[in-house]
Structure formats: structure tokens, C-alpha cells
Amino acid sequence: MSEAYTPTPFPWQTEEWELLQRTRRDDRLPHALLLTGPEGIGKRHFADALAASLLCSSAESDGSPCGKCRGCDLFRAGTHPDLKKIAPEAPGKAIRIDTIREYISKESLTALAGGYKIVIVDPADAMNRSAANSLLKTLEEPVNWTFIVLISAQPGKLAATIRSRCRKMDMRLPATAVAEQWLSGKMDGMDTALLLALASGAPLKARALADPELLGLRIKLLDEFAAIIAGKADPVTVAATWNKLDLSLVLGWYNGWLTDCLRLKTDPECNGLINPDQRKRLQRVGESIEFKKLFGTIDDLHQALLAQGSQLNQQMLLESLLLPLAGRRSGNTG
């Protein structure tokens, strides 16, 4: 039989882990925790490690699960009756009220193994209004020995009433040296510094980008972006192509290009670019875009990023972002 999997926090999460374990030892663990921070830093992994710790009957002095008890066996198998994970049915979809109700009734929140009952909601900002209101009732009248973990990279999307009833823990990006050390054995000879830059310092996102085909796709889309600005590509056609891809990935890259264009237009010698390998190219692109248009496009993009997960038409969203760069009006597309 293989050794039990015992999730532990990442090296850059030690401070947050120790704080919660001290709180637990003092019997002051909150009934609800809101984990926030950028995508790709391991918030969900931290929540899983915390759940494993709370469900373990023989945890180590630092809170690490033993990996050998019945609770750890059930956790590893994904069948622990006192751990419930709530997520959208598909990426970008909403978490609906029926899903919340299924797990937060007082009967459902009664632990079967005699310890904690844990509910993890990820991403919490995917809850629609009805679902959030349903959860709020439980947060206002918590059941003893329940522990609800809400995870969100965009906590501003959560109602203030939800946020106010949770202990908030902001998880930060790790120091570059810490991230590079963690990634060093996972990149198969790839440029760790570049991948971290592309991921805005988020180690898990950098690891996910360590794929030559994915990096090749990034350059292909950058070619199309530059061609639109140069008047050599149709933005509607490009939008249709991009619409077949992961919207979150595409918008993340697009945001990086525009941000670097603005930085380089302001200071051609600036450091800290998101795309350091494309400095000269993005400098040329930035020089061809007026400041007013560049600022306006970035503002539009940020609105689009905030709207992710809504019912917006992706094709129309991409067209609205690309058409202004080509100097065309959306009404001209027929």
C-alpha cells in the first residue's frame, strides 16, 4: 500500500498556518474563514491541508495530519463524511442555492465522526445572490464544531454581510527566491524566472504555464494582437479564434501585454515587466497606441475581468476589447 497523502501548507504559507494552529490550540478557531489572495498561490491547497489537520485524530504538534489514522484514510480517499466541498458545476458557472442548502442545514452540519464538520466553498464569489443569502443564515447562527472556509481571489464580489461574518486571512505572493526554490525541481529545465513573471509571481500558475505548447500559443496570440494594432488582422476574426480558448488565460495574457505596453511607453527602461522576453516588441506596440486609447482599453479589460463568471457573451466581450485597438467601431461589423 502506498504511503498516505498528507497535505501540508506550501513554504510561503507557514505564517498563516502557524497563526491558525495557535488559534486552534487556544480554542479560538473561528466558525468561518475567508481565504483571499491572488490566483495561483495555493489557497485551495491551504484549505485542504487545514481540513486534513482538523479531521486527523492524531495530528502532529505543528498541526500536520499524521496520515495514518482513520480520518486521514478517509480524507485521502475523498470519502470523509465530515468534509464537504462546494464548487460550480463547471468553470464560470454560478453556485446555486440548492447546492448550498444541501450542505448547510443543521442536520448536514452535524459531524458524523465526532469532530469538526468542514465545508469548503471555492470560489465563494461564484455564489449567486440566493445562494449567498442562504449561506449567510448559517454564518449568522453557526452550528457548534462546524468550520466553513470561503475561498476567493475577488472578495469584493462577496456581500459585505458575508465578509463581516468571517475571519479574513489575506494570503500573499511568496518572495521570488522562495517561489523559485519551490519551482526549481518542477520545471524540467524551463525558464523559472520567465514563468514566474508571466504568472505575476504566483508559483502554481507558473507551474501550470510550464508547457512549451502553451507558451507557443501565447506567442501566437501576441502575434495576432500586434497584427490587429498594425491593421493587418481583423479583430472580429481574431475574437472568434480566441473565443475557443480558455477565456481566463486569454484575458490574463492580454492584460499583461497592455500593462507592459503602458509601462514601456511611460519608461522604456522600466523593470518588472510581466513579459520580459517580449520587451522590444511590446515597446514598439505601445508606441503605436495613443495614451488615451491605451488607458481606455485597460479600463475596459479590468471591467471584463471583474465580469468573468457572469452570463456575458464571450465573443462579444472579446470583440469589444479588440475592436477599439483597430480603430473600428463595433457597429461597423454588421
Image (cartoon, rainbow, N blue to C red):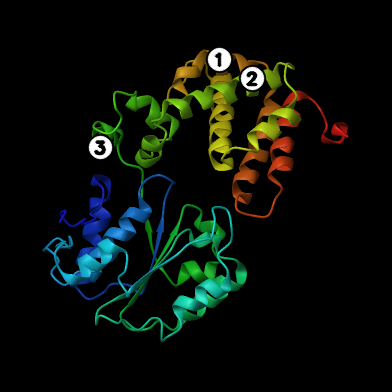
Residue at image point 28% right, 76% down: 116
Is 137 positioned to the left or the right of 1 in the image? right
Mark 2 lies on residue: 226
Residue 29 % position (x, y): 28, 72
Mark positioned earlier in the residue sequence (2 or 3)? 3
Q: Is residue 40 above or below residue 210?
A: below
Quadrant in which the N terminus is drawn: bottom left
Residue at image point 24% right, 82% down: 114
Residue 193 % position (x, y): 34, 26
Residue 274 seen in this snapshot: no
Residue at image point 12% right, 63% down: 60
Residue at image point 87% right, 36% down: 331
- Mark 2 residue type: Ala
Mark positioned earlier in the residue sequence (1 or 3)? 3
Residue 98 % position (x, y): 56, 75
Mark 3 lies on residue: 182
Residue 245, picture quadrant: top right
